[in-house]
Image: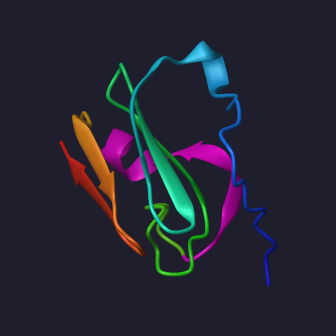
Amino acid sequence: AAFISIQAFPALLDLPQDLEVSAVSCGSRHTAAVTRGGELYTWGWGKYGQLGHGNNTSCDQARRVEHLVAEGLRVEEVVCGPWTTYVRV
């Protein structure tokens, strides 16, 4: 089983290429961030596929959701629920 650290207090996040974040949402054990360029990055507990990476793998590092990029979709808004992530494109 993958170990995912729990961060109880706000912490700085390093995103690739110095991306600017326009929105953030937190679920029970996962987080999602939308960049000004319309990309979605997710990280945390992924047991139910809520990270959007096409698997149930957890990840401590922010990772871009490649499926949205491949489909040419620009993310406008994200809302995380307890075990879900909703994205408006």
Tell whether 75 sits left or right of 7.
Answer: left
Residue at 56% across, 71% down: 46
Image location of residue 62, percent across then percent down: 62, 44
Image location of residue 35, percent across then percent down: 41, 26
Quick one: quadrant of the N terminus?
Answer: bottom right
Image location of residue 83, percent across then percent down: 42, 75
In the depicted view, which residue is nearer to us: 7 or 38?
7
Q: Looking at the picture, does residue 79 appear above or below residue 24?
A: below
In the depicted view, which residue is nearer to us: 72 or 34?
34
Q: Quadrant of residue 38?
A: top left
Residue at 78% across, 62% down: 5
Residue at 40% across, 73% down: 82
Is residue 15 visible in this depiction of the protein?
yes
In the depicted view, which residue is nearer to us: 73 or 42?
42
Residue at 65% across, 68% down: 58
Q: Magenta stretch containing residue 18, yes or no?
A: no
Quick one: quadrant of the C terminus?
Answer: top left
Which residues fall within the magenta stretch? 56-71
